[in-house]
Amino acid sequence: MNKKVFFISTAIDYPSEKPHLGHCLEKIQADVIARYKRLQGFDVHFSIGTDEHGLKIQRYAQKAGKKPQEFVDEMSGYFKDLWEKLNISNDDFVRTTEKRHIKVVQEIIKKIYKKGDIYKGKYKGLYCVDCESYYMPKDLIDGKCPIHHKLPELIEEEGYFFRMNKYQEALIRYIEENKNFIIPDSKRNEILNRLKEPLQDLSISRTAVKWGIPLPIDEKFTLFVWIDALINYLTTIDYPGKKFKKFWPADVHVIGKDIVWHHSVIWASLLLSLGLPLPKTIFVHGFITVKGEKMSKSLGNIINPVGLVEKYGRE
């Protein structure tokens, strides 16, 4: 008799600097669930990893006097070492610079383009390099990124867009009909409220960012780092092979509250375009805070977990 399967993932970490205590929260939460499911007799696939492309990495590598690949090889190693010290029981560690991942990403972009869901246009918007995300002026606080408190950069460029607006009504219906798709309810309601406004198509290409996956339909461009990163959930189960058929859809994506939109709207829209089922649950956790602020490398208020493990032990 075949075992029941269970696929759990965390968001992949951005290795611009060494890991901090906030990164540990998510891995430990997911690890507890993965271990519990194994005890129940499930065949579990538990994935984590590092998100290694983008403008921020490009700039940090330059600042360190290293090539981007050399830089992420070193930084990703710090994350892997920490998870080993904490005895995190992940089954896979995906790096977005791996050939297997690049192959899956480019295959998926070609499929979406062939379907007619990618087109060429022009974009102008406010971009936070630390978030690797665009913001509408109304979403800024005193003109600054609400997460990193930095002025966004005005970017204007020709590029390619994903027809995200096409899937707005389908997304709303799915979220309304599937109460456990986004947990807790407060985050589910937040997304539904945002979806009351017209959903903009998504700019998915970059010309200023050289450190990224080449866009397979036009290699003058690199792919928007968030599209690249989200597809790791398919890379880890060998899309479109037997393992993918066995484990998809994911049972749980464990993520932080700052990236709910990326998972419940951007990722979900991409999956709808591909004709794939959506994850069963996106479980959203809060932040470890310091004086009311998110613990963040960009804000410089981090606590080094390696020192804590060495002093007190991983338990």
Image: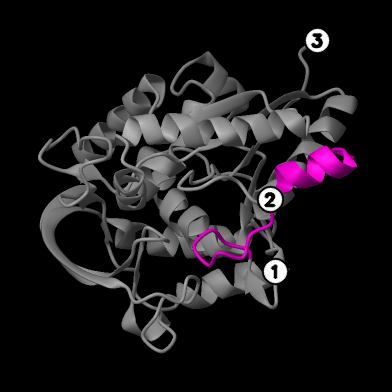
Kindly state the secondary structure of the residue where label 3 is placed: loop
Name the mark on residue 54. Answer: none
State the separation of the CA atoms marked 2 and 3.
45 Å
In the picture of the structure, the residue carrying the numbered disc 3 is: 1
Name the mark on residue 304. Answer: 2
Tell me residue 266's x, y (percent): 41, 55
Mark 3 vs mark 1: give the one in front: 1
Give the prevailing secondary structure in the magenta stretch.
loop
The residue under the point 15% across, 43% down is 221
The residue under the point 84% across, 38% down is 314
The residue under the point 44% across, 78% down is 196
Q: Quadrant of residue 170?
A: bottom left
Relative to 85, say whether 221 is above or below.
Answer: below
Q: Which residues are magenta?
A: 295-315
Tell me residue 120's x, y (percent): 11, 52
Relative to 142, say whether 295 is above or below.
Answer: above
Which comes sooner in the sequence, label 2 or label 1? 1
For the residue carrying disc 2, how many other residues have a C-alpha within 10 Å: few (<14), some (14-19), or many (20+)? few
Q: Could one spot residue 268 in this view of the protein?
A: yes
Please name the amino acid that badge 3 sits on.
Answer: Met
Name the mark on residue 289. Answer: 1
- Find the residue positioned furthest to the top: 1
**Residue 121 drawn in magenta:** no
Tell me residue 310's x, y (percent): 81, 38
Relative to 209, say whether 169 is above or below.
Answer: below
Please name the amino acid that badge 1 sits on.
Answer: Thr
Q: Could one spot residue 122 in this view of the protein?
A: no
